[in-house]
Image (cartoon, helix red, strand yellow):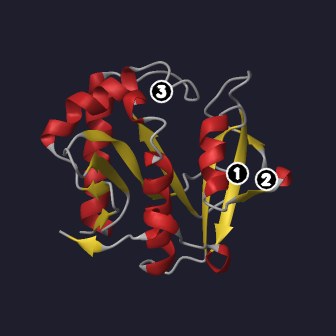
């Protein structure tokens, strides 16, 4: 399996000790403001099991993210094939961090690393990211990655009933447009 490292972060397999902080992240209504709702501990545990299975099967997926200097688990980042039933296909980059980890550049750093991995190690031609139209924080990360949005790709997410969270935006970046740079572009395989 791949472990991705940056100057400040380690993207790694999931550990049993990650469950409590992961469940707390998913129970936080501010973190989950652009999702259908908060998750129970059982739902968080099931997601960890799925994430780890995908990492073991494919060698990539949704990695646990920890701060390298402290070993503190702060969330997840990674890549996953787009769910069936969406109006587009491909591989999506994503991230979710605990609120205390916001504002430190960790989401951009982790996302840049997984996008570099997608192009460099997996040989993908394109990576996309999807969020609710109103999720300006995630959209800013997408733009910092060099992703662009075509309003023609916007869609109503079938997971949501009518309301402000239903409209979603799609950002994309092609391999030829990816410019890894700065301290966040140093994704390395390692253990």
- Tag 2: Cα neighbours inside 10 Å, few (<14), some, or many (≥20)? few
Q: Which residue is mark 2?
A: 153
Q: Residue at x 54, y 51 (%)?
A: 83
Q: Which residue is mark 3?
A: 31
Q: Which residue is mark 1?
A: 170
List x then y, in percent, for residue 96. 44, 40
- Between the residue at mark 1 and the residue at mark 3, the CA separation in whole angstroms equals 20 Å
- Between the residue at mark 1 and the residue at mark 2, the CA separation in whole angstroms equals 6 Å
Can you tell which of label 2 and label 3 is closer to the viewer? 3
Instruction: Pick whichever of labels 1 and 2 is earlier in the sequence.
Output: 2
Q: Is residue 101 left or right of residue 105?
A: left
Instruction: Pick whichever of labels 1 and 3 is earlier in the sequence.
Output: 3
List x then y, in percent, for residue 163. 73, 21
Q: Residue at x 46, y 80 (%)?
A: 120
List x then y, in percent, for residue 159. 61, 33
Can residue 123 be seen here? The reply is yes
Mark 2 lies on a secondary structure that is: helix
Location of residue 124 with respect to 74 vertically, above or below: below
- Tag 3: Cα neighbours inside 10 Å, few (<14), some, or many (≥20)? some
Quarter of the image containing the C terminus? bottom left
Q: Are marks 2 and 3 in contact (CB under 8 Å)?
A: no
Mark 1 lies on a secondary structure that is: strand
Q: Residue at x 25, y 45 (%)?
A: 49
Q: Are marks 1 and 2 in contact (CB under 8 Å)?
A: yes
- Between the residue at mark 2 and the residue at mark 3, the CA separation in whole angstroms equals 25 Å
């Amino acid at each position: 399996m791949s472990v991705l490292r940056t100057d400040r972060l380690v993207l790694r397999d999931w550990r049993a000790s990650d469950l409590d902080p992961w469940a707390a992240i998913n129970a936080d209504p501010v973190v989950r403001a652009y999702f259908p709702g908060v998750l129970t501990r059982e739902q968080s545990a099931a997601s960890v099991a799925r994430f780890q299975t995908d990492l073991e099967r494919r060698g990539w997926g949704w990695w646990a993210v920890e701060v390298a200097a402290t070993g503190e688990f702060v969330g997840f980042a990674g890549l996953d094939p787009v769910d069936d039933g969406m109006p587009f296909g491909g591989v999506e980059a994503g991230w979710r961090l605990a609120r205390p980890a916001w504002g430190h550049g960790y989401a951009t750093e982790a996302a840049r690393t997984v996008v570099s991995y997608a192009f460099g190690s997996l040989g993908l031609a394109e990576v996309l990211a999807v969020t609710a139209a109103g999720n300006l924080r995630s959209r800013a990360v997408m733009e910092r990655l060099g992703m662009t949005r075509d309003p023609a790709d916007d869609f109503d997410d079938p997971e949501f009933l009518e309301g402000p969270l239903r409209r979603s935006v799609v950002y994309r970046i092609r391999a030829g447009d990816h410019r890894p740079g700065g301290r966040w572009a140093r994704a390395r395989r390692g253990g």
